[in-house]
Amino acid sequence: MSKKTMKAVVYKHTGTVALEERPLPGLMDSRDAVIKVTLTTICSSDIHIKHGAVPRAIPGTILGHEFVGIVDQVGNDVKRFKPGDRVAVNVETFCGECFFCKRGYVNNCTDEHGGWALGCRIDGGQAEYVRVPFADNGITHIPDDVTDEDALFTGDILSTGYWGASLAEIKPADTVAVIGAGPTGLCTLMCAGLYGPARVIAIDISDERLELAKKQGLADIILNPLKQDVVQEVLRLTEGRGADAVLEAAGGKDTFQTAWKIARPNAVVCVVAMYEEAQVIPLPDMYGKNLVFKTGGVDASCCGEIMELIRAGRLNTSCLITHRTTLEHIMEAYDIFENKKDHVIKYAVNIE
Ligand SMILES: [Zn+2]
Ligand SMILES: [Zn+2]
């Protein structure tokens, strides 16, 4: 093998990411796999890292925690995968053996390479190759009849939507409100639908994203806070009660306040958004509403189930991919994605 370096997107320091040449990664532990990345994407969390809003992110790390590829090498203790396998990679790597992993809370894995490490604390998948720790836990086979594009969001935004919807305790006759119709919001809407609620309300400040949610059948009702009083409208739609379950996937300035205000008494308010600023819980104002708050980040431990639902056509994220490019041109994609130019929802970045 003559190739010694590869292209990779590196988080340099607050405000700067750059496409650089980096050494090829190798196995460091017997439970590692090295994946040849075939398709990757940019997540809003990458933008949060760039903004310095993710304290755990380490400068110098290769970004990327949402990607698919082909297994290139495996350590001796990797049992479920072999070179040549097509795989989707979880945002979280996890040991499977610690206190939290045993209870399914893989986001809180106490191993130094556990939890959200990829593309944050250890080198991620906006690169030609990536080392993935605990490969048996953190990667998922892609069936032959599922394309790379279909599988691309399995490990991160689909996992987040799937996890959020599972926390929200949605029942068949419920009215569910999802705040945010961006990439994570659309996945959350999609996954809320798996529970068969009577009505799904999507809330966003972009009419275009709302129209997409409606056109794709992910939302029954769409509300834009720039045009209407969302709290009043949700109350009106629910005979004054409020939504039975609220999922906040926007992370905007006022969206947390909207989330608890539109929830009916005793509802679950599930916060899957990542904020760049502290939020206030005004307890006197919500006294007597008896709300249950559940907060992120995702426990990405259901990727096998998600892959089955993709294969069965129950989860279909093709409407999210509005832009395609190659790793060579990824910095242009960063600009378009960060600044929400050109009606972008998600990029599929091909790696030759
Ligand atoms: Zn992400
Ligand atoms: Zn663990």
Image: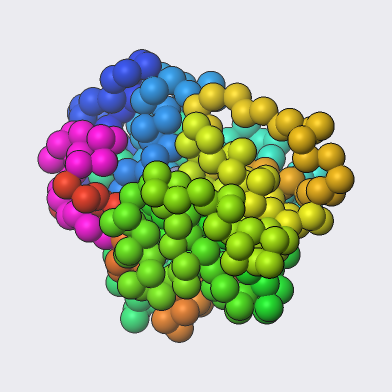
x, y percentage for residue 125? Answer: 35, 43
- Residue under the point 48% across and 36% down: 252
Write down the quadrant of residue 131 in the picture: top left
Which one is nearer the viewer's eye here, 338 or 116? 338
x, y percentage for residue 306? Answer: 52, 69
x, y percentage for residue 315? Answer: 45, 73
Determine whether 173 is above or below 260 in the image.
below
Determine whether 201 is above or below 106 in the image.
below
Q: Is residue 77 visible?
A: no
Which one is nearer the viewer's eye here, 274 or 326? 274
Which one is nearer the viewer's eye here, 100 or 4? 100
Write down the quadrant of residue 169 in the picture: bottom right
- Residue under the point 37% across and 16% down: 14
Q: Quadrant of ligand 1?
A: top left
x, y percentage for residue 29? Answer: 54, 40
Q: Is residue 170 visible?
A: yes
Write down the quadrant of residue 212 in the picture: bottom left
Region rendered in magenta: 321-341
| Left or right: residue 202 compared with residue 239 | left
- Residue under the point 32% across and 55% down: 207
